[in-house]
Image (spheres, rainbow, N blue to C red):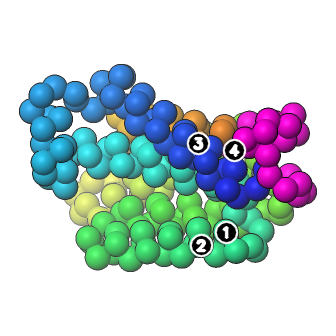
Amino acid sequence: MQFMGHMRGGLAAGAAAVALGGVSGAISLDDSALRQMLYSPFASPDFYTLGGMFLTAVFMALFPDIDTPSIPQRWFLRAMAAVLVGLAWQGRMDLFAVVTLATLAPMLDHHRGWTHSLATPWVLSAVLAVVWEYFRAKEAWLSGFSWANVGRMLQDDWMYVVAAVMGHYTHLLLDLPALRFVPFLRNEPDHH
Ligand SMILES: [Zn+2]
């Protein structure tokens, strides 16, 4: 499956992740919360949660094929560079560290190596949670690294892990040879 197919899959997974965020109660859907999201989205924490889930799913749907040089890879890296500049601008160096590592990760192995494993989104989530906790511990002078915090983080932020898994599994699904014959997904044949 080629890039545009995976992009469509990622957008669908992102929409599904957002729907799940609403249904599961990860974000509140009461009147005042919805009104805040609609009228002053940037002041609404739920807006960032939903946006984060959507982007996580899209990122993970594209992630496995970022390991080879290509024009989509260049655009992917440009988009990620823009995200990193934005995070630095906001002073979110903790997220900067996590996003940098996630962006480099697919390029650490040969083509279709570890990025196409069913375990990938779970392992990646765990590794990034450890990095994030390590960064937080270094920033906060009074507290050290704590595995309990890593566990709590993964538990509290489960919706991002689920969004990552949804996006990533969409990619694996679309890579299945059988799906080449589904007309609206059909792309020019390539090595996938
Ligand atoms: Zn692939």
**Residue at figure coordinates x 25%, y 60% from the top left:** 140
Looking at the rendered structure, the secondary structure element under dot 2 is: helix
The x and y percentages for residue 134 are: 42, 57
- Which kind of residue does numbered mark 1 sit on? Pro
Q: CA distance from mark 2 to mark 4?
A: 18 Å
Q: Is residue 159 left or right of residue 182?
A: left
**Label 3 belongs to which residue?**
167
State the extent of the magenta-drawn residues as a range: 171-192
- Which kind of residue does numbered mark 2 sit on? Trp
Q: Is mark 1 within 8 Å of ligand 1?
A: no
Q: Earlier in the sequence, mark 2 or mark 4?
A: 2
| Furthest residue in direction left, as rendered | 32
Looking at the rendered structure, the secondary structure element under dot 4 is: helix
- Asked if 141 appears above or below 86 in the picture, the reply is above
Q: Earlier in the sequence, mark 2 or mark 3?
A: 2
Residue 72, which numbered label? 1
Category of crowding for the residue at label 2, using alpha-carbon neighbours closer than 10 angstroms: few (below 14), some (14–19), many (at least 20): few
Q: Nearer the viewer, mark 3 or mark 1?
A: 1
Category of crowding for the residue at label 1, using alpha-carbon neighbours closer than 10 angstroms: few (below 14), some (14–19), many (at least 20): some
